[in-house]
Structures are given as C-alpha cells and as structure tokens.
Image (spheres, rainbow, N blue to C red):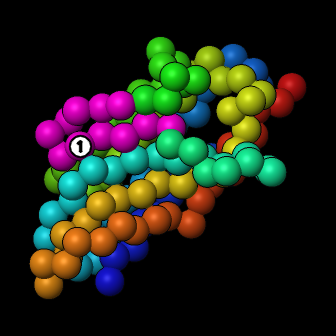
Amino acid sequence: QVQLVESGGGLVQPGGSLRLSCAASGRIFSINAMGWYRQAPGKQRELVAVITSGGSTNYADSVKGRFTISRDNAKNTVYLQMNSLKPEDTAVYYCKAVVVTTTLSLNDYWGQGTQVTVSS
C-alpha cells in the first residue's frame, strides 16, 4: 500500500558529509512523523532523528549538532543531512513513516535501508 524508497548512502571519509533521502508513495492520506533509524553490525536498531508533520524535531544525543532532519510535505519526502561523520556512524540507515492510508488506517512503514560507511 505504501512504499518508502531511500537513497544517498555510500562511503565517505571521516569528517565528510552525506545526505539521505526517503520518498514515500502509494495510498497515502497523510503522514504524521517521519524518522531515521540506524543499525550497526551486532547492535540494535536505534533512533537517529525524527520530525513531526509540524516540523518539530528530536535527535539522538550522539548526532546532535552534526545531523539535520527535514521534510518536504508536498513531496512526502524526508531528508537527513549528515555532517562531520565519524566511523561510529557506520550503519544501515532506515527511514520510517507513520502513515494514515486512504482507508484511514494508521500504520508504520519502513524503507529497505541504505548503507552508510565512514572510513578512511
């Protein structure tokens, strides 16, 4: 019913930047919160940043001041600008959207994940 497609991952050197995008499509009536999560090898998935439909944001302490989440409601797209990247930011990054579908059902949807590797 709803698909999330992520893009923008890759390999970057420490101190570098990347911008992730996640576009939602399908039977969308409205989107509430959108967020980014990450999962490193051997670790649990963790919240990186979240943004509400009104633009309020929240960040994990580990990324505050370095990452910025934003969204374009007209395009049903959420972005994650990542600056001053560190090796410990290496992970698969997933986007999540809390969607009200056209049948007025409220569900969480996840993207397929995009790999971010920070290494020299």
Foreground of the two, 66 or 20: 66
Foreground of the two, 58 or 69: 58
Residue found farthest to the right: 120
Question: In the rendered view of the protein, which quadrant contains the C terminus?
Answer: top right
Residue at 74% of width from left, 30% of height from top?
88
Q: Is residue 120 magenta?
A: no
- Say whether residue 60 is left or right of residue 14: left
Residue at 32% of width from left, 36% of height from top?
70
Q: Position of residue 11 (x, y in %)?
A: 75, 39
Q: Position of residue 115 (x, y in %)?
A: 68, 51
**Above or below for 76 versus 62:** below
Residue at 69% of width from left, 17% of height from top?
15
**Above or below for 32 versus 40:** below
- Say whether residue 111 is left or right of residue 106: right
Residue 23 in view in this figure: yes
Q: Position of residue 14 (x, y in %)?
A: 75, 21
Mark 1 highlights which residue?
Answer: 52
Label 1: few (<14), some (14–19) or many (≥20) C-alpha neighbours in 10 Å: some
Q: Amino acid at mark 1?
A: Thr
Q: Is residue 49 magenta?
A: yes
Q: Position of residue 107 (x, y in %)?
A: 30, 71
Which residues fall within the magenta stretch? 48-58
- Say whether residue 81 is left or right of residue 118: left
Foreground of the two, 80 or 60: 60
Residue 16 in view in this figure: no
Question: In the rendered view of the protein, which quadrant contains the N terminus?
Answer: bottom left
Foreground of the two, 70 or 96: 96
Question: Under tag 1, what secondary structure?
Answer: loop
